[in-house]
Image (cartoon, rainbow, N blue to C red):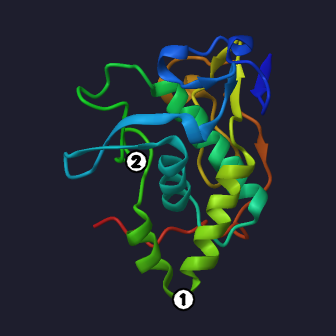
Amino acid sequence: EIAVLGEGQAADAVGLDNDHLVVIGDVIQDAGIHAGDQLEQDGGVTEMTLSGYLWGVVAAEMPASFELEALKAQAVAARTYWLSQSGTSRHEDADICADSSCCQAYITREEAAANWGDKAVDYGGRIAQAVAQTDGLCVTYEGKPIQALFFSSAPGSTVDAQAVWGRALPYLVSVDSPEGEEVPNYHSPYRPK
């Protein structure tokens, strides 16, 4: 069973740990949630709201030019991943870090604006809209946030969690993936030396 916690649903309905969420009238609202301390890439720690953190994750993980529904899906995946990692002892002074090889990629608004140039206002607004329109949404399995792992494309089929991490997860199973070379960024510019 996979459940999505929507606006107006009680946190207890999906068994989320209220010690790691600010629950306002038994309803989860991102604006009232602090992501706690978020470990920066330079080793410093910054406290921010969850919606502010999600903005930086979506901006770093997906091109802002993608369709709004894709950005919204990314926001839900990022929120769900944060919930699944929050309160773990993975980082001594923070809930999560900005290293994509460990947690989720993250970029500041200033860094994003510099990357986007004259499209910064439009792209920043689209990401803010995606985060706001998915406020409070997360994906759960058996009452707990899933490990919301993702990638951009897979030639032919995705790979089962068992094959990647050696542990079966019933919601991360191989499925057909018919897309191929027409997918943006399918070919990486990286060339091994």
Q: Tell me how many marks there are.
A: 2
Give how far across and how far down residue 73 sits, in percent.
Answer: 71, 48
Q: Secondary structure at mark 2?
A: loop
- Closest to the observer, 19 or 69: 19
For label 1, the crowd category at 10 Å Cα-Cα, with few meaning under 14, some 14 to 19 and many 20 or more, is few
Q: Residue at x 75, y 50 (%)?
A: 133
Q: Residue furthest front?
A: 25
Q: Is residue 184 left or right of residue 105?
A: right
On screen, residue 127 above or below 132: below
Gap between marks 2 and 1 measured at Cα: 27 Å
Q: Residue at x 60, y 33 (%)?
A: 80
- Name the kind of residue labelled 2 in the image: Ser
Q: Residue at x 45, y 70 (%)?
A: 112
For label 2, the crowd category at 10 Å Cα-Cα, with few meaning under 14, some 14 to 19 and many 20 or more, is few
Q: Quadrant of the N terminus?
A: top right
- Closest to the observer, 166 or 98: 98
Q: Residue furthest left?
A: 43
Say the numbered circle drawn on residue 100: 2
Give how far across and how far down residue 31 sits, in percent.
Answer: 58, 42
Residue with the mark numbered 1: 118
Q: Secondary structure at mark 1?
A: helix
Give how far across and how far down residue 168 sits, in percent.
Answer: 60, 17
- Name the kind of residue labelled 1 in the image: Asp
Q: Residue furthest bottom?
A: 118
Q: Nearer the viewer, mark 2 or mark 1?
A: 1
Say the numbered circle drawn on residue 162: none
Residue 37 appearing in the image: yes
On screen, residue 33 above or below 180: above
